[in-house]
Amino acid sequence: MNSSGQIYATEQFGKECKFKENVFENYWCFYSSIEFKNPESGKLYYFGMNKKGNPIRGRVLSVSDESLLF
């Protein structure tokens, strides 16, 4: 994930590849970027996917979105 919250593929592991896993009581998981936050609000960037499996930009997601749950 880059500083704009966009997900991308890379061959080398770096700081932008680190995510924090959060697990709910019902065993659903969601992931947030360790490195990047929204510079204006300080909110975390989350990793999510839509129904087709395409990534959703991290800055448009919130914890209540179903696209975060894995």
Image (tube, grey):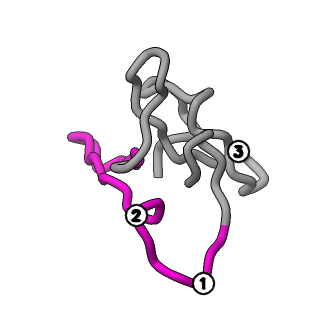
Read off the residue under disc 1. Answer: 11
> Residue at horizontal 58%, vertical 31%?
59
Label pair 2/1, CB-CB below 8 angstroms: no
Q: Name which of mark 2 and mark 3 comes first in the sequence.
A: 2
Above or below, comparing residue 3 to residue 1 in the picture: above
- Nearer the viewer's eye, disc 2 or disc 3? 2
Q: Is residue 13 magenta?
A: yes
- Secondary structure at badge 1 equals loop
CA neighbours of label 1 inside 10 A, class few (<14), some (14 to 19), many (20+): few
Which residue is tagged 2? 15
Residue 12's place in the image compared with 28, above or below, is below
Magenta range is 9-33
Q: Is residue 14 magenta?
A: yes
| 15 lies left or right of 27 | right
User: In what element is the residue under mark 2?
Assistant: helix
In front of the other: 49 or 57: 57
- Mark number displayed over residue 50: 3
